[in-house]
């Protein structure tokens, strides 16, 4: 299994026009740990939400990077 993040704008569209990290992770836990360490940088780069994918299957989507 290969886990990765899809970066989204506020409307849920994929953010592709900027150079963003394209990390691939061996587990869901590794992907989530990485996001916990890097969400602020992603938000500053214009990413509003993320979706977690396992290969091409969406595990979950619409996770906001904005603090509550």
Image (cartoon, rainbow, N blue to C red):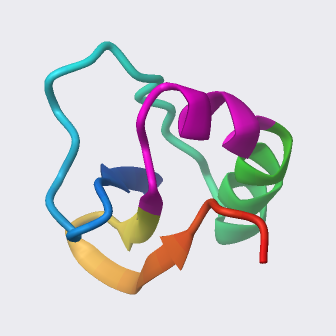
Residue 29 is situated, as x and y percent measured from the top left of the image, at: 77, 67
Q: Residue furthest bottom?
A: 60
The single residue placed furthest to the front in the displayed view is 68
Q: Does the rendering let one see residue 1?
A: no
Position of the C terminus, as image quadrant, is bottom right
Place of residue 47 in the rendered image (x, y in percent of width and height, measured from the top left): 43, 44
Tell whether 37 sits left or right of 10.
right
Residue drawn at x 73%, y 38% as measured from the top left = 40
Q: Is residue 27 left or right of residue 21?
A: right
> Image point 41% across, 29% down: which residue?
22
Q: Nearer the viewer, residue 10 or 34?
A: 10
Q: Image quadrant of residue 60?
A: bottom left
The part of the chain drawn in magenta is 38-49
Residue in the image at 58% along x and 29% along y: 44
Q: Is residue 38 left or right of residue 12?
A: right
| Looking at the image, residue 18 lies above or below residue 63 | above
Above or below 32: residue 39: above
* Camera sees residue 5: yes
Tell me how many marks there are. 0
| Residue at 37 percent of width and 68 percent of height | 53
Residue 37 sits in quarter: top right
Is 43 magenta? The answer is yes
Which residue sits furthest top? 19
Image position, residue 27 (x, y; %): 66, 62
Q: Along the horizontal axis of the image, is 35 left or right of 37?
A: left
Quarter that holds the N terminus = bottom left
């Amino acid at each position: 299994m290969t886990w990765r993040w899809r970066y989204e704008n506020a409307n849920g569209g994929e953010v592709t026009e900027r150079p963003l990290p394209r990390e691939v992770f061996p587990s869901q836990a590794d992907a989530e740990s990485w996001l916990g360490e890097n969400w602020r940088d992603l938000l500053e780069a214009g990413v509003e939400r993320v979706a977690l994918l396992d290969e091409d299957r969406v595990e979950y989507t619409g996770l906001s990077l904005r603090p509550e």
